[in-house]
Image (tube, grey):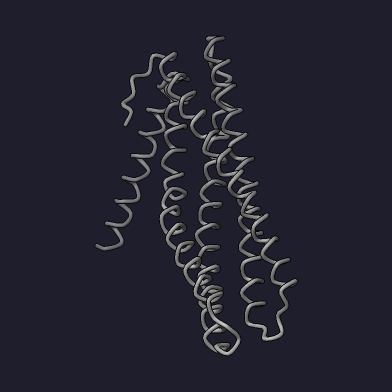
Protein backbone atom coordinates (compact mmCIF):
# COMPACT_ATOMS: atom_id res chain seq x y z
CA UNK A 1 0.00 0.00 0.00
CA UNK A 2 2.72 2.59 0.81
CA UNK A 3 4.39 2.00 -2.58
CA UNK A 4 1.07 2.35 -4.40
CA UNK A 5 0.38 5.66 -2.66
CA UNK A 6 3.78 6.99 -3.61
CA UNK A 7 3.19 6.09 -7.26
CA UNK A 8 -0.25 7.71 -7.15
CA UNK A 9 1.18 10.94 -5.73
CA UNK A 10 3.90 10.89 -8.36
CA UNK A 11 1.30 10.51 -11.13
CA UNK A 12 -0.72 13.38 -9.65
CA UNK A 13 2.38 15.58 -9.60
CA UNK A 14 3.08 14.77 -13.24
CA UNK A 15 -0.51 15.60 -14.11
CA UNK A 16 -0.31 18.92 -12.25
CA UNK A 17 2.95 19.75 -14.01
CA UNK A 18 1.40 18.94 -17.37
CA UNK A 19 -1.62 21.09 -16.49
CA UNK A 20 0.63 24.00 -15.50
CA UNK A 21 2.61 23.63 -18.72
CA UNK A 22 -0.66 23.62 -20.67
CA UNK A 23 -1.74 26.83 -18.97
CA UNK A 24 1.63 28.36 -19.80
CA UNK A 25 1.23 27.40 -23.45
CA UNK A 26 -2.21 29.03 -23.57
CA UNK A 27 -0.82 32.34 -22.31
CA UNK A 28 0.06 35.00 -24.84
CA UNK A 29 3.76 36.01 -25.01
CA UNK A 30 3.35 39.00 -22.67
CA UNK A 31 1.68 36.80 -20.06
CA UNK A 32 4.42 34.20 -20.41
CA UNK A 33 7.02 36.91 -19.85
CA UNK A 34 5.11 38.10 -16.79
CA UNK A 35 5.17 34.55 -15.38
CA UNK A 36 8.89 34.25 -16.03
CA UNK A 37 9.74 37.62 -14.47
CA UNK A 38 7.72 36.86 -11.35
CA UNK A 39 9.49 33.51 -11.04
CA UNK A 40 12.72 35.51 -10.97
CA UNK A 41 11.30 37.56 -8.09
CA UNK A 42 10.62 34.39 -6.11
CA UNK A 43 14.13 33.07 -6.75
CA UNK A 44 15.68 36.28 -5.48
CA UNK A 45 13.91 35.99 -2.13
CA UNK A 46 16.91 33.92 -1.02
CA UNK A 47 19.11 36.88 -1.99
CA UNK A 48 16.96 39.23 0.07
CA UNK A 49 17.01 36.91 3.07
CA UNK A 50 20.79 37.28 3.35
CA UNK A 51 20.72 41.05 3.88
CA UNK A 52 19.60 41.17 7.52
CA UNK A 53 22.01 38.52 8.86
CA UNK A 54 24.86 40.10 6.88
CA UNK A 55 24.22 43.51 8.43
CA UNK A 56 23.99 41.93 11.88
CA UNK A 57 27.29 40.09 11.45
CA UNK A 58 29.00 43.21 10.11
CA UNK A 59 27.92 45.08 13.24
CA UNK A 60 29.18 42.31 15.53
CA UNK A 61 32.53 42.21 13.75
CA UNK A 62 32.87 45.99 13.93
CA UNK A 63 32.27 45.85 17.68
CA UNK A 64 34.97 43.19 18.10
CA UNK A 65 37.43 45.27 16.09
CA UNK A 66 36.71 48.30 18.29
CA UNK A 67 37.47 46.20 21.38
CA UNK A 68 40.72 44.89 19.89
CA UNK A 69 42.19 48.29 19.08
CA UNK A 70 41.44 49.51 22.61
CA UNK A 71 43.73 46.83 24.03
CA UNK A 72 47.51 46.84 24.27
CA UNK A 73 50.04 44.05 23.83
CA UNK A 74 50.01 43.31 27.57
CA UNK A 75 46.53 41.93 26.87
CA UNK A 76 47.73 39.77 23.99
CA UNK A 77 45.71 36.69 24.95
CA UNK A 78 42.50 38.70 24.89
CA UNK A 79 43.48 40.23 21.54
CA UNK A 80 44.00 36.76 20.06
CA UNK A 81 40.64 35.56 21.38
CA UNK A 82 38.76 38.55 19.96
CA UNK A 83 40.62 38.33 16.64
CA UNK A 84 39.70 34.66 16.32
CA UNK A 85 36.05 35.51 17.03
CA UNK A 86 36.19 38.18 14.33
CA UNK A 87 37.65 35.69 11.84
CA UNK A 88 34.81 33.28 12.62
CA UNK A 89 32.27 36.02 11.94
CA UNK A 90 34.02 36.88 8.67
CA UNK A 91 33.64 33.25 7.62
CA UNK A 92 29.92 33.39 8.45
CA UNK A 93 29.57 36.52 6.37
CA UNK A 94 31.16 34.68 3.45
CA UNK A 95 28.58 31.90 3.80
CA UNK A 96 25.73 34.41 3.48
CA UNK A 97 27.50 36.16 0.62
CA UNK A 98 27.82 32.87 -1.25
CA UNK A 99 24.12 32.13 -0.74
CA UNK A 100 23.38 35.58 -2.13
CA UNK A 101 25.60 34.90 -5.14
CA UNK A 102 23.98 31.50 -5.73
CA UNK A 103 20.54 33.12 -5.68
CA UNK A 104 21.65 35.68 -8.27
CA UNK A 105 23.07 32.95 -10.50
CA UNK A 106 19.75 31.08 -10.36
CA UNK A 107 17.94 34.33 -11.09
CA UNK A 108 20.16 34.95 -14.12
CA UNK A 109 19.52 31.47 -15.46
CA UNK A 110 15.75 31.84 -15.05
CA UNK A 111 15.76 35.32 -16.57
CA UNK A 112 17.55 33.94 -19.61
CA UNK A 113 14.32 32.13 -20.49
CA UNK A 114 12.76 35.48 -21.39
CA UNK A 115 14.82 35.63 -24.58
CA UNK A 116 12.98 32.76 -26.24
CA UNK A 117 9.59 34.21 -25.37
CA UNK A 118 10.56 37.71 -26.51
CA UNK A 119 10.80 36.47 -30.09
CA UNK A 120 7.06 35.81 -30.03
CA UNK A 121 6.10 39.42 -29.32
CA UNK A 122 4.51 41.14 -32.30
CA UNK A 123 4.15 44.65 -30.89
CA UNK A 124 7.28 46.73 -31.74
CA UNK A 125 6.70 48.96 -28.73
CA UNK A 126 6.63 45.98 -26.38
CA UNK A 127 9.69 44.52 -28.09
CA UNK A 128 11.60 47.75 -27.46
CA UNK A 129 10.49 47.99 -23.84
CA UNK A 130 11.40 44.38 -23.19
CA UNK A 131 14.83 44.83 -24.79
CA UNK A 132 15.49 47.79 -22.47
CA UNK A 133 14.23 45.74 -19.52
CA UNK A 134 16.55 42.86 -20.40
CA UNK A 135 19.56 45.17 -20.67
CA UNK A 136 18.82 46.71 -17.28
CA UNK A 137 18.71 43.27 -15.71
CA UNK A 138 21.92 42.14 -17.42
CA UNK A 139 23.63 45.32 -16.19
CA UNK A 140 22.31 44.53 -12.70
CA UNK A 141 23.79 41.02 -12.79
CA UNK A 142 27.15 42.42 -13.96
CA UNK A 143 27.22 44.96 -11.14
CA UNK A 144 26.43 42.25 -8.61
CA UNK A 145 29.43 40.29 -9.90
CA UNK A 146 31.56 43.35 -9.12
CA UNK A 147 29.93 43.67 -5.72
CA UNK A 148 30.59 40.03 -4.90
CA UNK A 149 34.26 40.27 -5.90
CA UNK A 150 34.85 43.48 -3.93
CA UNK A 151 33.10 42.09 -0.86
CA UNK A 152 35.06 38.84 -1.12
CA UNK A 153 38.30 40.83 -1.34
CA UNK A 154 37.24 42.85 1.69
CA UNK A 155 36.58 39.70 3.70
CA UNK A 156 40.00 38.31 2.80
CA UNK A 157 41.67 41.56 3.85
CA UNK A 158 39.63 41.57 7.07
CA UNK A 159 40.89 38.11 7.99
CA UNK A 160 44.47 39.09 7.14
CA UNK A 161 44.06 42.11 9.39
CA UNK A 162 42.90 40.01 12.35
CA UNK A 163 45.80 37.61 11.85
CA UNK A 164 48.19 40.57 11.88
CA UNK A 165 46.63 41.93 15.06
CA UNK A 166 47.58 38.69 16.81
CA UNK A 167 51.26 39.33 16.05
CA UNK A 168 53.16 40.76 19.01
CA UNK A 169 55.76 42.26 16.65
CA UNK A 170 53.22 44.08 14.52
CA UNK A 171 54.45 47.46 13.22
CA UNK A 172 52.43 50.61 12.64
CA UNK A 173 53.42 50.61 8.96
CA UNK A 174 52.16 47.05 8.44
CA UNK A 175 48.81 47.66 10.12
CA UNK A 176 48.27 50.92 8.22
CA UNK A 177 49.00 49.21 4.91
CA UNK A 178 46.48 46.46 5.68
CA UNK A 179 43.82 48.91 6.84
CA UNK A 180 44.24 50.81 3.57
CA UNK A 181 43.57 47.55 1.67
CA UNK A 182 40.45 46.92 3.73
CA UNK A 183 39.13 50.44 3.25
CA UNK A 184 39.78 50.42 -0.49
CA UNK A 185 37.90 47.14 -0.91
CA UNK A 186 34.88 48.35 1.01
CA UNK A 187 34.87 51.67 -0.86
CA UNK A 188 34.38 49.56 -3.98
CA UNK A 189 31.65 47.58 -2.21
CA UNK A 190 29.78 50.78 -1.35
CA UNK A 191 30.10 52.09 -4.90
CA UNK A 192 28.91 48.82 -6.44
CA UNK A 193 26.08 48.54 -3.94
CA UNK A 194 24.81 52.02 -4.79
CA UNK A 195 24.90 51.22 -8.52
CA UNK A 196 23.23 47.86 -7.93
CA UNK A 197 20.37 49.45 -5.96
CA UNK A 198 19.96 52.15 -8.59
CA UNK A 199 19.85 49.57 -11.39
CA UNK A 200 17.36 47.47 -9.41
CA UNK A 201 15.10 50.48 -9.02
CA UNK A 202 15.33 51.24 -12.75
CA UNK A 203 14.55 47.62 -13.60
CA UNK A 204 11.51 47.48 -11.32
CA UNK A 205 10.09 50.66 -12.85
CA UNK A 206 10.74 49.39 -16.37
CA UNK A 207 9.11 46.07 -15.53
CA UNK A 208 5.93 47.75 -14.29
CA UNK A 209 5.94 49.98 -17.37
CA UNK A 210 6.14 46.87 -19.58
CA UNK A 211 3.27 45.23 -17.70
CA UNK A 212 1.18 48.37 -18.13
CA UNK A 213 1.94 48.64 -21.85
CA UNK A 214 1.07 44.96 -22.29
CA UNK A 215 -2.27 45.48 -20.55
CA UNK A 216 -1.34 43.22 -17.66
CA UNK A 217 -3.16 44.11 -14.48
CA UNK A 218 -0.85 43.55 -11.53
CA UNK A 219 -1.01 44.54 -7.88
CA UNK A 220 1.98 46.42 -6.49
CA UNK A 221 2.95 46.69 -2.84
Question: Which residue of the protein is positioned furthest toward the left in this rendering?
Answer: 1
Q: State the image quarter where residue 55 is shown.
A: bottom left
Say which quadrant the N terminus sits in.
bottom left
Residue 167 image-quadrant placement? bottom right
Q: Residue at x 46, y 25 (%)?
A: 205
Seen at 37% across and 18% down, the residue is: 216
Quadrant in which the C terminus appears: top left
Q: Is residue 42 above or below residue 77?
A: above
Coordinates of residue 48 in the picture (x, y in percent):
43, 48
**Count of marks placed on residues:** 0
Q: Which one is in front, 90 or 167?
A: 167
Q: Nearer the viewer, residue 175 or 102?
A: 175
The residue at 51%/28% (across/down) is 202
**Residue 154 vs residue 96, the one in the foreground:** 154
Q: Is residue 97 left or right of residue 38?
A: right
Residue 154 higher or lower than 73, as above or below? above
Q: How far across and down, in percent of the image, does residue 102 sit?
A: 54, 52
Q: Residue 183: x, y in percent?
A: 64, 57
Q: Nearer the viewer, residue 53 or 10?
A: 53
Is 192 placed above or below 1 here? above
Q: Residue at x 54, y 76 (%)?
A: 68
Q: Position of residue 54 (x, y in %)?
A: 47, 58
Amino acid sequence: MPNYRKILVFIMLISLAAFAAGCMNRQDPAEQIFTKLEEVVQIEKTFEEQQEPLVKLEKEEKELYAKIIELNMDQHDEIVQLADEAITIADKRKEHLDKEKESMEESKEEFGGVEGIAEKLEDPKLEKQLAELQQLMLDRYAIHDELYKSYTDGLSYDKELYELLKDKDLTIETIEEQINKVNAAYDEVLSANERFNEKTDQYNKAKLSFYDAAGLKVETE
